[in-house]
Amino acid sequence: MQQFFSSYRLNMTVRRAALATLVAGSTAIAALLWSEVIAARGLDALGCASVVLFTMNFAWLSLSFWSAVFGLAVRLIGRDPISLASAQDRPLTTRTAIIMPICNEDPARVAAGIEASILGLEETGEARHFDLFVLSDSRDTDAELRERQMIAQFRLQHTGSLGIYYRRRQQNIGRKAGNIEDFIRRWGADYAHMIVFDADSVMSGQSLVALARLMEMHPDCGIIQTLAMPAGGQTLFARMLQFANRLYAPVLASGLACWTGGDSLYYGHNAIVRTAVFARYCGLPILPGKPPLGGEILSHDFIEGALTVGGGYKVWLVPELTGSYEGMPANIIDYAKRDRRWCHGNLQHARLLGLPLVKPMGRLLLSMGVLSYLTSPLWLLLLVSSTADVIQHTAAGIVYFKPGFNLFPDWPVAADFQIDVLLAMTLAALLLPKVMGLSLALLRRTHRDVFGGTLSLCASVLMEIAFSTLLAPIMMLLQTAFVAEVLFTRRSVAWMTQARDDRGLGWREAFQRHAGHTALGVLWAGGLFALAPHFFWWLAPIWLGLVIAVPLSVWSSRRNVGRALMRAGMLLTPEETRPPRELRRMRRALHRRIDPIAVEPSASDGAMVPPESGLTMPRIAWPGQRMAGAGETVPAAIRDAL
């Protein structure tokens, strides 16, 4: 086994070829079966459209399924033999900046996450190799004052362990990407690496040190991305997503890491970045044209990862690294608001596929980001065309003799076998990745116990499947609207601060947001029941989720429902049954408040930042122009300097 994995390039070629073969083969079989089902009733224009749409959608499902199979194999082996080696327990020799870009965030929540991470870092004995920068784009005067008080207090409490700095930009240029670029231009030369935090990020001290050690051990790495686990949510919606991510995400992430290797994804936070490499290759272009597809790039992370790989450095996703956490939206509406921003940003990536520095794997991953949102309108079109096709044939009835002379009747062809096989394949693609995550947890008693035990875990999985089934058609319509907003209305999205508290929804807000979904669900169900009753129950998961969208949105946003299920032992995660030290510290810190009388913040940024020693960050040229360093391998001068 070890000999087979000895050659990285050969190994990745074999893995990717195997994945492509499995995806193409299963998609071809499903498409053939679907075409036989449609052809049994006559292959008209609606039927042809249905076959095309089904093939595109099943290919996406198949990719996710086979990636999960790869992930299950990796998890059963223990670890991927070609992934990054475990960080050696050796003293650090380089300096790393922990940077947290924020904009109008709750300073108490930010302070709690920072304090938990700093205390863990101090316990490792390596805190002197790190500095913390809070990079504010806040426009609110009161928020700025509280941010300064927060930093002033931290500087008093942690004097001598690591540098703690605060900078507020006067102009919010380029959003988060511009905030990070400003840091690089002012202080990037002082730090070999930077660990990027979101405002809700928390990482253990061991994870922070491990990332820095891995960067020192692997000079060809440009980015190392951890798998951030959502934690801390109390509402039913947040706890449902926390449970699903905690149980299923390790399998899916291990599968993705298995076939992407050192050409993987960068998610923009809870990751370590080689500063000089980022400065050289990741100066994002301004897209020609008007927003939403032109102007500043909204989602910077995927393209930054692709550009880093294009520059000759590796981007690794390392799901085995633990101690990395983030927050989760508390309700469907806030989740959709965040998803809307991501949708607009990802659709912009279609324009970046032609950048000369982006390699084929980078183009594939960027395309996957685009397709992750285009699949929703494709599924909707498939459902609509299938419904119309069924209603049309039901209304026409069985036609034994076509117009003109017929020597023999045209007997209908049964396609029950094809339908049964298709149903089994679709359910397998949807549900088996969840079963894989469940199976891994059930294999060991310690894993079962942290999810509440066997019975609780199995019952929670059934509950999560039911909830995600009802949620899927709502998200399908929301994402379809987001895509249409970008492609047809050309209305740009406002990149506002994300809601991070356990906000419950009122009935009025839920009705305003979901009234159209409910109306469509009622009309869809009523039309099927009246015109094609045999198809009514087949589409029950679709119309039922839409019909109950309002109460589902309201009840899933309730903290009392989420806490009641927690007390009943449902939807438990390891972070709830055995909370790690950093999350316990964060919760304790949230109960404390900064005393503005005891701590007087400095009025000037100059007293809260180190002397400037920046790096140049050239902006990437648009296709047709040449960027300095495009197509080159790892530059020796930069590698030696690191």
Image (spheres, rainbow, N blue to C red):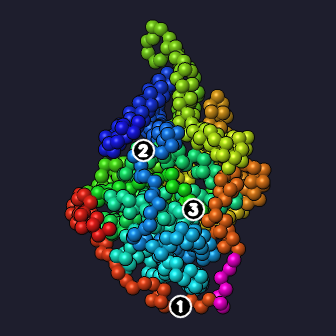
Please name the residue that numbered disc 2 is placed on.
81
**In-image side of 180 versus 311 (left or right):** right
Q: Nearer the viewer, mark 3 or mark 2?
A: 2
Residue in front for this viewpoint, 171 or 542 = 171
Magenta stretch, overall SS: loop
Q: Where is residue 102 in the image (x, y as percent from the top left)?
A: 52, 74
Please name the residue that numbered disc 3 is placed on.
326
Report the residue at 62% width, 33% height from top. 538
What amino acid is labelled 3 in the image? Glu
In the image, residue 373 sits, relative to residue 119, either above or below, namely above
Report the residue at 58% width, 51% height from top. 245
Residue in front for this viewpoint, 228 or 145 = 228
Query: Which residue ends up furthest to the top in the rendered image?
Result: 407
The quarter of the rendered structure image containing the C terminus is bottom left
**In-image side of 262 versus 127 (left or right):** left
Please name the residue that numbered disc 1 is placed on.
602
Q: Identify the mark nearer the N-term, 3 or 1.
A: 3
Q: Identify the mark nearer the N-term, 3 or 2.
A: 2
What amino acid is labelled 2 in the image? Pro
Does the rendering let one see residue 42?
no
Identify the magenta region: 592-598
